[in-house]
Structure formats: structure tokens, C-alpha cells
Image (cartoon, rainbow, N blue to C red):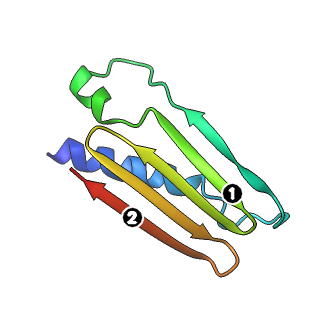
Amino acid sequence: MKNLSYLFIAILIISLSGCSLFQGGSDTFEGYINYDIEYEGDIDEATRAQLPTSVTDYYKGAKIRKEQETAMFSMYQIVNSANKEVIILMDMM
């Protein structure tokens, strides 16, 4: 259970690090980016099944929606960089 907690915290930190909350830039960009995630190293199958395999970011102006789903939970982040707000929605199974 302790390893699962560390895994969850690591996924949360990695997903928040890519949200570009403090980056400047144009507010007119609109589109999406889909990341495919592959894991290297010796990871057992039970752990690998709980890790996300893709992350999708949707951009529209100063707002970003980040989606990642695993076998155990779904996590959605809504980032408003204009007023520096982050909302995290989690659906644990």
C-alpha cells in the first residue's frame, strides 16, 4: 500500500509539472497534444497495469484540460493560467 501511495504521488507531481501554469505565451493557441507513455526497466505487470499509458492535453486560450486514465483511476485537471487556478478531478475505482 505504501508503494501505491508513492506511485500516486509521483504521477500527480509529473502531471502537474507539465501543466504550464507559470509559462507565458500567446493566449490564442487552440488544439490538443496526446502523449503516449512507455515505461522502461524492470516493472512487474501488476504495477505496469496501474500506470497511465497516455495523457491528453487540450488547450484553448489560457485554459488547459489534462486527461489521464489508468485501470485504477481517472484523473482530469483543469488549469486556468489567467488567474492561476488548478482543479483536479479524480475518479477512483
Residue tagged by mark 1? 59
Residue 72, which numbered label? none
Q: Where in the figure is residue 69, as x and y percent of width and height?
A: 39, 43
Query: Label 2: few (<14), some or many (≥20) within 10 Å?
Result: few
Q: Residue furthest left?
A: 1
**Is residue 11 toward the left or the right of residue 79 in the image?**
left
Query: Residue 43 sits in which quadrant?
Result: top left
Name the residue at 68% across, 47% down: 32
Q: Amino acid at mark 2?
A: Leu
**Is residue 72 toward the left or the right of residue 76 in the image?**
left
Disc 2 element: strand
Q: Where in the figure is residue 31, as x and y percent of width and height?
A: 73, 50
**Are dots 2 and 1 in contact, CB under 8 Å?**
no
**Is residue 51 toward the left or the right of residue 46 in the image?**
right
Is 13 placed above or below 53 here?
below
Q: Residue furthest bottom?
A: 83
Query: Residue 3 sits in which quadrant?
Result: top left
**Is residue 77 toward the left or the right of residue 31 in the image?**
left
Disc 1 element: strand
The residues bearing labels 2 and 1 have C-alpha atoms spaced at a distance of 17 Å
Question: Which of 45/54 is in front?
Answer: 54
Residue 89, which numbered label? 2
Query: Label 1: few (<14), some or many (≥20) within 10 Å?
Result: some
Name the residue at 85% across, 64% down: 26
Q: Earlier in the sequence, mark 2 or mark 1?
A: 1
